Amino acid sequence: MSAPATTVSAPLTGASAAAANPAGKALAVGLAGLSVSAIGVIVSGAHAAATSYLVGFSYWTAVAIGMLMLVLIHHIFDASWSTVIRRQYEHGLAAFKWLFVLFLPLLATPFISGGDTIWPWMNPAHVMHHGTVAEDVLYQKKAAFLNVPMFIGATLVFFAVWVWLSARLRKASFTQDTDGDLKWTTMNRKTAAFGIPMNALALTFAAIFWMKSLEYHWFSTMYGVWFFANCIRAALAFGVFIMVWLTARGDYRGILNKNHWHCIGTLGHAFVIFWAYVTFSQYFLIWNANVPEETFWYNLREIHADGTPSQWKWVGLLILFGHFFVPFLYLLSFRLKSTAAGLLRINIWIAAIILIDLCYNILPSLKDAHGDPLPFLSLNLVWVAASVVGVGGVCVWAYLRSLAGSGAKLIPVRDPRIKESLTYHE
């Protein structure tokens, strides 16, 4: 049984050919950023450069994971309002295979410098305060999980899950534009049913392997949920950027109304609260238990070994107020969260704070001779910025390449919910 085609206006005949030129520019910018990031190996050393690169890589991976999760959530709830914006997230999923390629330099670190480039547990001979990693009781307890074969195998599984789920969702959605068959909607609902738990497990273990294990002594049961919250918030932010760009270019003219923007803003507001709940819960439980294997992670980010406040303390306060209070209060306003301009302003802020949050979680693993984290304001921020531009340029190129070359319509014109979505009202 096929659904009847929905009549749509001229801009919906597909992505503009003009997107091809911006795609080339995005790739050029990305390659330039990656080149600058590589220079960091010479200037600051492999450890600092690779750790800074991990920040930029994790940032864009979070955006892609969030987009995948939002598409899966759309299908599992059979949502109507989000049908008109779903296609742009589907184009964003094209970045996963390129993110895998960009992760290969980090995947090679176990075989460089004795495996001591980023993750100290990869090198049993790595010297710590109380001996080597091999002699560390906590590492011995975690060795079955934290070992090089497990790290490499798990990473391959993560990307296999993301690439496979993305391919299934994109194929069904794009094909439905041509034949209008309802079986593709059913297929995507089934994909969402098993895809959500698969993606949840993949993003959780990716966060643990790639970021949390930088300080492998640390224990936290909330880390995967914290990363999930940032993934969704990042995807919503970049979704707003895409929608504003397409509206300004004329493609989305007459498609998005105030109710669509309000739903995006309301969903973003919900995840502001969710992020705050998860982050506060993690901090409060660790503070209340007062176990050294947990509290040291926050101590490193608040005070130096001599007890004086560090720069990271002020970064933590910026995250507290900037990641919660500012967007929470801003998005309370119906007017501000119901317009493209209002959402654009706050989501630029949110996208920047998410990057700072990832810096807060990753960069303090770089320590000086006294065991204190290197200052936040350092040359490493240059390599972080270069990695964000480099990896981001490639991801934007992948999105624009899919937008221009996939042959898919701008919106899913033969989705059974498209008419309801185009006329959506609360």
Image (cartoon, grey):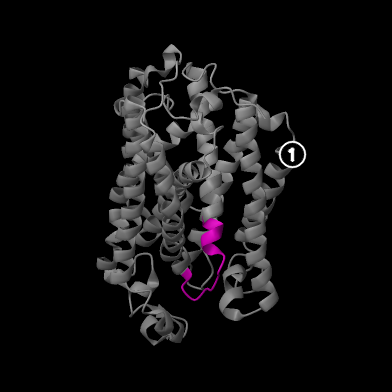
Magenta highlight range: 215-227
**Where is residue 185 drawn, in percent x and y?**
41, 37
Of residue 341 and residue 183, the one placed in the foreground of this image is: 183
In the image, is residue 217 part of the stretch drawn in magenta?
yes
**Where is residue 386 drawn, in percent x and y?**
41, 44
Dividing the picture into quarters, in which one does residue 94 lie? top left
Dividing the picture into quarters, in which one does residue 347 lie? top right
Q: Residues within 10 Å of mark 1 (few under 14, many from 20)?
A: few
Amino acid type, label 1: Leu
From where the camera sits, is residue 245 visible?
A: yes
Residue in view at x 53 percent, y 34 percent: 82
**Where is residue 12 drawn, in percent x and y?**
42, 18
Badge count: 1
- Relative to 351, 290 lies left or right: right
SS for dot 1? loop
Residue receiving disc 1: 332
Residue in view at x 49 percent, y 46 percent: 76
In the image, is residue 173 part of the stretch drawn in magenta?
no
Q: Quadrant of the N terminus?
A: top left
